[in-house]
Amino acid sequence: MLVTSGIVGGEPGGGGKMADVDEYQDRHLTIRVVADQRDVREVTTIRRAVFTDEQHLTDVVDRDPYDFGAGAVQILALLDDLPVGVGRLHVSRGEGQIAWVAILPQYRGQGIGWEIMDALLAAAGQHGAKRVTLSAQTHAVGFYRLLGFRTVGKVWMMSKIEHITMVRDLEDED
Ligand SMILES: CC(C)(COP(=O)(O)OP(=O)(O)OC[C@H]1O[C@@H](n2cnc3c(N)ncnc32)[C@H](O)[C@@H]1OP(=O)(O)O)[C@@H](O)C(=O)NCCC(=O)NCCS
């Protein structure tokens, strides 16, 4: 399922954050729900590049029980035909959890992470979530704050990387 699609530098998704960067002008960004096993393999490749090879956070990127089944939505971002970013939502009992948000290093800072989060938050609302939580790496807190999340509780460590829980309420939103 296509979520949004547009020329970089335009406004995919309406009011999107795609940056006005010459290098990416005229490249086509597609944000869509993971559709088949090929997409799943692309998701695994990006997770492994970012969370295993770059961050050394975990070697296990393809055995999350919340990736599939009822309430699960995986998003894949493609620049032209190249997979460049991912994110995953799981909704259960009115609560959404977002995880595995990652953009390949060379494609960061162009608004792609924003578009993925926009799609995941919209999906959360469609699945009846009243609020959404995530475990933010502390370097990304500013990114999630811009998206309406607030920090909750104390910083904790996972694989030597600082994390903090963040929450966004969805109730009373359009
Ligand atoms: C965090 C991440 C997903 C952001 O994606 P991105 O595509 O680079 O971000 P965007 O270009 O969409 O940024 C959207 C807005 O957030 C801001 N932003 C992005 N990363 C930020 C950060 N780390 N801290 C503060 N603000 C940030 C941007 O400046 C932009 O704001 P602006 O439009 O007002 O300038 C990306 O850096 C990434 O994949 N990091 C490695 C994996 C990771 O740590 N994931 C998060 C795990 S919790």
Image (cartoon, grey):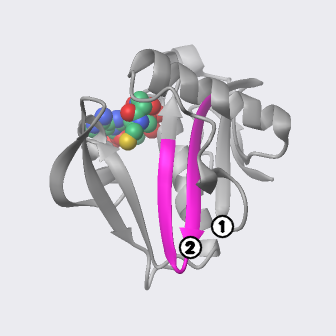
Residue 27 on the magenta segment: no
Residue placed at 52% from the left, 79% from the top?
A: 94
In the image, the residue with mark 2 has its CB under 8 Å from the nearest atom of ligand 1: no
Q: Residue sitting at 26 percent across and 45 percent down?
A: 141
**Amino acid type, label 2:** Ser
Q: Position of residue 14 (x, y in %)?
A: 58, 54
Residue 27 vs 169, above or below: the answer is above
| 115 over 150 or under it: above or below | above
Q: Nearer the viewer, residue 109 or 127?
A: 127
Ligand 1, seen in the image, is in the quarter at: top left
Q: Which residues are magenta?
A: 84-100
Residue 71 has which mark? 1
Q: Which mark is residue 92?
A: 2
User: Where is residue 147 drawn, in percent x and y?
Assistant: 37, 55
Residue lying furthest left: 154
Q: Going 46% across and 27% down the picture, which residue do you hit?
A: 51
Q: Is residue 127 visible?
A: yes
Which residue appears at 54% of the width and 19% of the height? 49
Instruction: Name the N-terminal-most of marks 1 and 2.
Output: 1
- Secondary structure at numbered mark 2: strand
